[in-house]
Image (cartoon, rainbow, N blue to C red):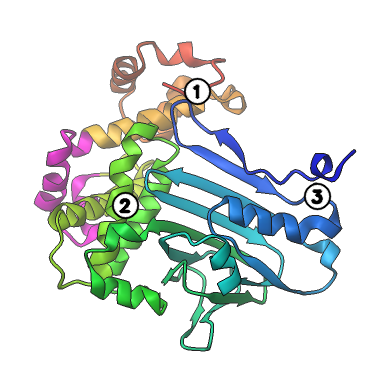
Amino acid sequence: MGQADRIPRKLAPVVTRPGGVPALIATVRDVSPSERISAWEEMSAQAGLKMTNKSIVGDPEMFNSEWLVRPAGPVTMIQVACSNRVIARSSADIAKGASGTVFIFEQLGRGGLTFETFGGRRSLDLRQGEALVGDSDEPYVTSTELGFDNRAWVIPRDLIADSPAALDVIAGGARLNGDPRAKLLMTFLGEFRRQLDLLPAIAVEGYASNIASLLRIALDPAGDFEGKVESIASARLARVHAAIERRLLDPLLSPARIAADCGASVRTIHNLFAPTGESFSDYVSGRRLELAHNMLTRPDSAFQSVADIAYETGFNSLSTFYTRYRERFGHAPGDARGAGTSGN
């Protein structure tokens, strides 16, 4: 058996939902230990950001890593977990494949992470839940004590080319501070990530383009961009969606509760939904129906009655649940038993 046959180095596509955005996944777990570092570097090139593992901590044969790559319109989400390393994107890496992109980097793991541009021009320490921005074609090095667990959103530089001020900030690497504009961007990213498994691929383009607009707004608040008002409204709606998710199973969920959570008026909440053609109550009902449908089609919920699932997912009227479920899916809730799929 040749080396190419025994080392699975491809990012393999997996469709998590019919019609949805595919995920590309890979692991070095089944790769020969002596080949794991080179396999990891090859995977990084396939993901669009060629990087180098610079140092080994402990036994090199204990190195493990998992990749999740989600192409989403013009934006790509890359999530990586791997053993303790120092990881760099060097000048040599960039020369082999300039990406023409910028990135938003989120620290997911409990351990801290240090991001440093080559030459020591800028050094940033990130804690869990914090984020920074940088230019993919400017050399940098990252290091961590507890292993890498992070997410990067890779965005074409052309999408923010009309904001020289934002590009200047990105070029040197900068922390995304906790001001309201940065919070809007990060909330929107969280909601977009959740929606990737729900949206048809054709609908993803519009969501993804908003990320670039919100990044420009966060880094260049005085800039005048086309679609600026619409992007801010989309981000505020994403914040409302995130608040709804946190209370989705609460039968007392209401516009007033969500308004309080978001620091907005009830009128503002309703106004944010108006351009979507869907009311607040319609959106909440739709999300609860999706959740109930998924539960009904899962084998591990077969012991639960339809009524139990209806009440568990936030409905307080069984007749309303049956009516809306049939309108949404075209059949009675009980007919979904044994279907074995969460598709519509």
Q: Is residue 264 magenta?
A: yes
Three-letter code for the amino acid on which mark 2 is drawn = Ala
Of helix, strand and loop, which one carries label 1? helix
Packing grade of label 1 (10 A; few <14, some 14-19, many >=20) is many
Q: State how many labels appear.
A: 3
Mark 3 to mark 2: distance in Å?
42 Å
Q: Position of residue 326 (x, y in %)?
A: 33, 14
Can you tell which of label 1 and label 3 is closer to the viewer? Answer: 3
First in sequence: mark 1 vs mark 3: 3
Mark 1 to mark 3: distance in Å?
39 Å
Three-letter code for the amino acid on which mark 1 is drawn = Leu
Of helix, strand and loop, which one carries label 3? loop
- Front position in the image: 179 or 50: 50
State the residue at coordinates (13%, 45%): 270
Q: Which quarter of the image is occupied by the N terminus?
A: top right
Three-letter code for the amino acid on which mark 3 is drawn = Val
State the residue at coordinates (33%, 48%): 208
State the residue at coordinates (53%, 76%): 140
Q: Position of residue 322 (x, y in %)?
A: 34, 17
- Front position in the image: 133 or 267: 133
Residue 184 can be seen in this image: no
Residue beneath label 3, please? 31
Magenta-tinted stretch: 254-281
For the stretch drawn in magenta, the main secondary structure is: helix
User: Which disc, if any, is residue 249?
Assistant: none
User: Which disc, if any, is residue 243?
Assistant: 2
